[in-house]
């Protein structure tokens, strides 16, 4: 999709459709007021008839509005401005996109970045609108022919020429995050017979060739054996698909700058292993690599933005299958750190691959490490499908992530990482067990990982509730690419602030 921002006069705009807003109680936004003046009160007359109330979800298409050169004017409901949030604004843009698509309109000028909000500046509105348009128009068409009409060109109208520089930056950021997020969605939506650990490694090498500041290394099983990654390798034993350990290094900062490390869980299909899952909805376990997809998508976003920092993405990738060679409940494995683990449940495998990846990350002496994983069903029960779960061994890092999530609308919610929970991981036969019982499952999973992060400034994002949708809208969401990209942009100073 071609997206731009312009300061052209609304009166002279020639477009298949010009989009403006109407707030609650049929109040026109500044752009809509301009159109009303140009049309000699035509829009006010329509509003008095009661065809649109201005509530969220409303939309009304007007044809051949007098005084305007655009073929149509779309009035879109924006609700109460005082209640405008990132999520509500995104819903407004989604409504615009779906209405235009249903009318088979492929080219439009959108003038809704004038909602006078204390929380959302006009340039931030443009960024969010850019992201939302790219998300709304996403279609997974690699394995299925898509005939759904969609927008191909959108221009955002901006009145204030002084804000043009930031507005263009807003579009640039929105495009980069949109591309990274859709990259993550494509990877997540692929079936397990295509998106294997080998496939993920090949994709990482494709990105390597696309970006000059990116260097990718892929470790195979023998490499991991030499490193002593017994915990990770124990998960892949039941699969005929070999594991891969992907390391993507982005060098945008100075050579001496310590990197930020993102670790993504890459279980390309999770049957549960010997502790096999119930059959219902097991197909959704292709999404168990959405942590990997999101950090790889974030790597695409930061390369597009050319951030002046160093970032490393680590993806431990396996397939978890039952087999005669698979790990069994009660097995004891040795991690790369030298700590031993009693595997009480082979379906708690994500933490087994992440712990070795976290130990491996120490070699880079990172400023901070964030791991991202569809780790626990308990997180879905606790937080639902809205925020990711956040746990960290450093409050400053946790606060930075929470702030980034609030800024971009891709939120997280912090949960406790207290020493009190560690006792649940006690084992009579190893240094620790890989599960801690039914209580506080998200927290004990993070407690397990924390035992491998003593030397790190570390945070854990449990995205089990936000990584994909079920039902009629079934598919990967690409979260938390916006959150991770926002966090990394904020580490670059104020140059990316809107």
Image (cartoon, rainbow, N blue to C red):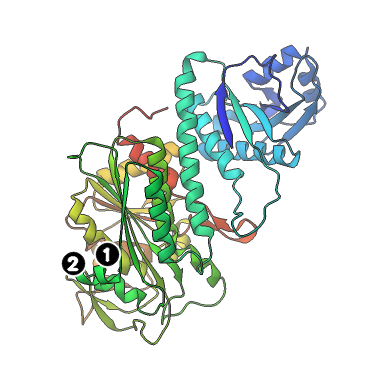
Extreme-bottom residue of the structure: 324
Rendered image: mark on residue 221: none
Is the Cβ of the residue at disc 1 closer than 8 Å to that at disc 2? yes
Q: From the image, which quarter does the N terminus lie in?
A: top right
Q: Is residue 186 left or right of residue 311?
A: right
Locate residue 497, reporting x and y percent: 39, 29
Residue 336 lies in quadrant: bottom left
61 or 10: nearer the viewer: 10
State whether residue 174 is above or below residue 143.
Answer: above
Quick one: label 1 or label 2, which is nearer the N terminus?
2
Locate residue 219, reporting x and y percent: 29, 63
Query: Element under label 1?
Result: helix
**Which residue is pictured at 20% across the width and 70% down the height?**
226
* Residue underneath mark 1: 355
Q: CA distance from mark 1 to mark 2?
A: 8 Å
338 or 54: nearer the viewer: 338
* Residue underneath mark 2: 337
Q: Decide: few, some or many residues near mark 2? Use Cα within 10 Å; few <14, some 14-19, many ≥20.
A: some
State whether residue 226 is above or below residue 29.
Answer: below
């Amino acid at each position: 999709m071609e997206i731009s921002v312009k300061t052209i006069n609304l009166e002279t705009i020639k477009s298949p459709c010009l989009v403006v807003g109407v707030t609650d109680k049929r109040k026109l936004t500044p752009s809509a007021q301009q159109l009303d003046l140009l049309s000699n009160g035509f829009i006010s007359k329509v509003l008095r008839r009661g065809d649109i109330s201005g509530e969220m979800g409303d939309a009304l298409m007007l044809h051949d509005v007098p005084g305007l050169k655009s073929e149509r004017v779309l009035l879109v409901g924006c609700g109460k401005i005082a209640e405008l949030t990132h999520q509500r604004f995104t819903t407004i843009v989604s409504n615009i996109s779906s209405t235009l698509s249903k009318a088979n309109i492929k080219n439009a000028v959108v003038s809704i970045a004038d909602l006078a909000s204390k929380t959302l500046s006009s340039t931030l509105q443009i960024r969010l609108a850019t992201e939302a348009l790219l998300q709304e128009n996403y279609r997974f068409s690699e394995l299925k022919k898509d005939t759904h009409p969609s927008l191909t060109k959108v221009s955002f109208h901006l009145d204030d020429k002084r804000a043009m520089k930031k507005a263009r930056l807003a579009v640039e950021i929105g495009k980069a995050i949109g591309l990274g997020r859709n990259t993550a969605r494509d990877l997540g939506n692929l079936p397990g017979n295509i998106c294997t650990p080998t496939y993920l490694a090949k994709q990482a090498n494709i990105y390597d060739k696309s970006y000059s500041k990116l260097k990718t290394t892929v470790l195979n099983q023998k490499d991991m054996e030499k490193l002593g990654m017994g915990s990770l390798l124990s998960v892949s034993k039941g699969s005929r698909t070999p594991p891969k350990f992907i390391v993507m290094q982005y060098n945008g900062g100075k050579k001496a700058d310590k990197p930020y490390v993102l670790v993504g869980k890459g279980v390309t299909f999770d049957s549960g292993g010997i502790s096999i899952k119930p059959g219902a909805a097991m197909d959704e376990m292709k999404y168990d690599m959405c942590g990997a997809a999101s950090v790889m998508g974030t790597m695409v976003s930061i390369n597009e933005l050319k951030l002046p920092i160093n970032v490393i993405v680590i993806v431990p990738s396996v397939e978890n299958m039952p087999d005669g060679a698979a790990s069994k409940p009660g097995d004891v494995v040795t991690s790369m750190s030298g700590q031993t683990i009693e595997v009480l449940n082979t379906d708690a495998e994500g933490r087994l691959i992440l712990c070795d990846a976290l130990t491996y990350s120490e070699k880079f002496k990172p400023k901070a490490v964030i791991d991202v994983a569809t780790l626990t069903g308990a997180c879905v029960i606790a937080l639902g499908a809205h925020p990711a779960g956040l746990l960290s061994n450093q409050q400053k890092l946790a606060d930075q992530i929470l702030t980034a999530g609030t800024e971009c609308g891709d939120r997280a919610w912090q949960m406790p990482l207290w020493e009190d929970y560690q006792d649940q991981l006690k084992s009579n036969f190893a240094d620790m067990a890989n599960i801690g019982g039914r209580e506080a499952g998200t927290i004990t999973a993070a407690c397990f990982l924390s035992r491998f992060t003593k030397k790190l400034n570390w945070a854990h994002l449990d995205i089990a509730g936000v990584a994909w949708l079920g039902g009629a809208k079934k598919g990967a969401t690409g979260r938390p690419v916006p959150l991770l990209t926002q966090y990394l942009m904020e580490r670059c100073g104020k140059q990316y602030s809107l």
